[in-house]
Image (cartoon, rainbow, N blue to C red):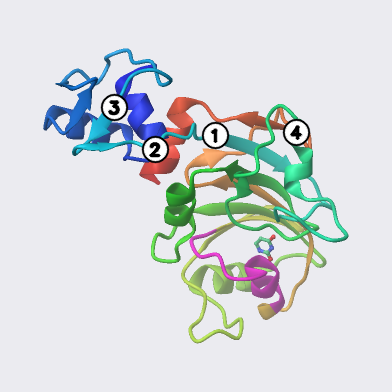
Amino acid sequence: MRLDKYLCDAGIGTRSQVKEIIRRKAVTVNGKTVTDAGLKIDAEKDIILYQGRQIAYTALVYYLLNKPAGVVSATRDPSDRTVLDLLSPTDYRDDIFPAGRLDKDTEGFLLLTNDGPLAHRLLTPKRHVDKTYEVHTESPVTEAQLRLLETGVDIGEDKPTAPASATLIAEQVLLLTIHEGKFHQVKRMLEAVGNRVTGLKRISFGGLELDETLLPGQYRALTESEVAILHEA
Ligand code: URA
């Protein structure tokens, strides 16, 4: 494995950050300072130190799940199936968790990972990571409702929701991109404008689109470049 990938997987930083760390001579492999980020290392045998300390390496995993309705976004649940129950026994590890929550009846993009720092960065309200939902509504969406959703609505929090982007794609279907992640936010936003959600699917998250070849309940590993996009999100 390349040294820079090893350091990324160990949670030291993004690809560009670890390249810089290596360039600054902060990394040694078997006692020698290295400056080649592409150096091939053996994660089992080589002794790799960052700033003089041995790195605790756990391979990081990133799965894009097309969450089906009817399963809960939790690691365990006394009565319902969880999103982790959808992982095959070979992929399952007890350190994987869903990065964020979708309601039990919501479908679509859910990241399953064991990368705590990345999940934290993606979910912290300060970050404003974009999330786009396909929203099916009980009654036709009016122009006035769209404008209100875009401007911000009162959902009973301290402040109105932040500006969002709303595009009608059918009389009762809209694409709504929000940057916050308040509890039941989309449902509460639609209620606040006098409508109601009848179906909800997350179709993009942090710059990545839902892979439409995945049927509900299916998942795949993210590619390295997709993981890099999440790191930059
Ligand atoms: N907003 C909701 O209301 N539900 C979800 O599952 C996600 C966003």
Position of residue 1 measured from the top left corner of the image (x, y, whole percent): 39, 16
Q: Which of marks 1 and 2 is nearer the N terminus?
A: 2
Identify residue for label 1. 61
Position of residue 67 measured from the top left corner of the image (x, y, whole percent): 73, 45
Residue nearer the viewer, 217 or 88: 88
Q: Is residue 67 above or below residue 34?
A: below
Q: Which amino acid does label 3 sit on?
A: Ile
Q: Is residue 25 above or below residue 151?
A: above
Identify residue for label 4. 218
Q: Earlier in the sequence, mark 4 or mark 2?
A: 2
Viewer-nearest of discs 3 and 4: 3
Q: Which of marks 1 and 3 is nearer the N terminus?
A: 3
Task: Give the Cα distance between marks 2 and 3.
Answer: 10 Å
Identify residue for label 3. 48
Viewer-nearest of discs 1 and 3: 3
Q: Is mark 4 within 8 Å of ligand 1?
A: no
Viewer-nearest of discs 4 and 2: 2
Q: Which of marks 3 and 4 is nearer the N terminus?
A: 3
Position of residue 125 measured from the top left corner of the image (x, y, whole percent): 45, 66
Disc 3 to disc 4: CB gap under 8 Å = no
Q: Which amino acid does label 2 sit on?
A: Ala
Viewer-nearest of discs 1 and 4: 1
* Magenta span: 178-191
Q: How crowded is mark 1: few (under 14 residues within 10 Å), some or many (20 or more)?
A: some
Q: Residues within 10 Å of mark 4 (few under 14, many from 20)?
A: some
Q: Which residue lies furthest to the top in this view?
A: 40
Give the image quarter of residue 4: top left
Residue 186 belongs to the span the image colors magenta: yes
Which numbered tag is attached to residue 56?
2
Q: What residue type is labelled 4?
A: Gln
